[in-house]
Amino acid sequence: MQSVDLSDEQYFQLCQANRDLRFERSAKGELIIMPPAGSNSSHRNIKLSQQLANWSDTNGLGIEFDSSGGFKLPNGADRSPDASWVRRERWEALTPEEQDRFAPVCPDFVAELRFKTDSLKELRLKMQEYIDNGALLGWLLDPQTRKVEIYRPGLPVEVLDNPERLSGEPVLPGFVLNLAAIWA
């Protein structure tokens, strides 16, 4: 992969000028162009985001984001998890200008859905990057194998085989993800 020398402003403008494409940027400055999701993947992603948003709306503890939300991680990478959540006090500590761009914060919670074309190795590295940059909980959901990898700081990755539900405790108090819509 080749690195592209773009300032943060140039990267932001590139993303704004190409809203039909999804970009990420690695900590090394490599530009990653991600194709639009297929219909099944998009459906699974909205079901994930919907459940997270419904839970977040009921408790007001934080702010949820879908796959189009970008974050500037402490290591310099620009990432867009499929679903994510930031505690309200951390979000409100950002300026309005920071909130309008790629927020300079690593989400407290991130979820990635593996699509058929995704490299499992690359997704695992991305999940570890989130944890290394401050995420408290990460879920890698693989509908093809019906496995979930759970990432937490300082703990080995936990792998669940075909779970029906996932608890977000203690990071997401009271949140339980129903996987029926994700696995369908």
Image: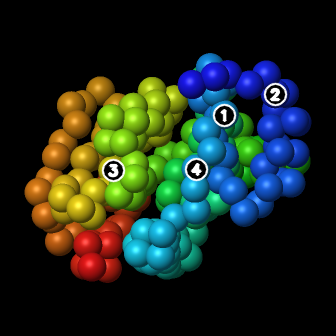
Which residue in the protein does label 2 denote?
Answer: 6
In this view, the mark in front (1 or 3): 1
Residues at discs 4 and 2 in contact (Cβ within 8 Å): no
Q: Is residue 16 left or right of residue 111?
A: right
Q: Nearer the viewer, mark 4 or mark 3?
A: 4
Q: Whole-Å distance between the Cαs marked 4 and 3?
A: 17 Å
- In this rendering, would 124 be left or right of 13? left
Looking at the rendered structure, the kind of residue marked 3 is Leu
Assign a secondary structure to mark 2: loop
Q: Earlier in the sequence, mark 4 or mark 2?
A: 2
Quadrant where the image shows the C terminus:
bottom left
Front position in the image: 15 or 171: 15
Q: 65 or 23, which lies in front?
A: 23
Q: Position of residue 143 (x, y in %)?
A: 27, 64
Residue at the image position 48 percent from the left and 69 percent from the top: 38
Residue that carries the numbered disc 1 in the rendered image = 31
Name the residue rendered at 18%, 58% in the picture.
145
**Mark number for residue 34?**
4
**CA distance for labels 1 and 2:** 9 Å
- 61 to 43, vertically: above or below: above
Q: Quadrant of residue 79?
A: top right
Question: Are discs 1 and 2 less than 8 Å apart at CB?
Answer: yes
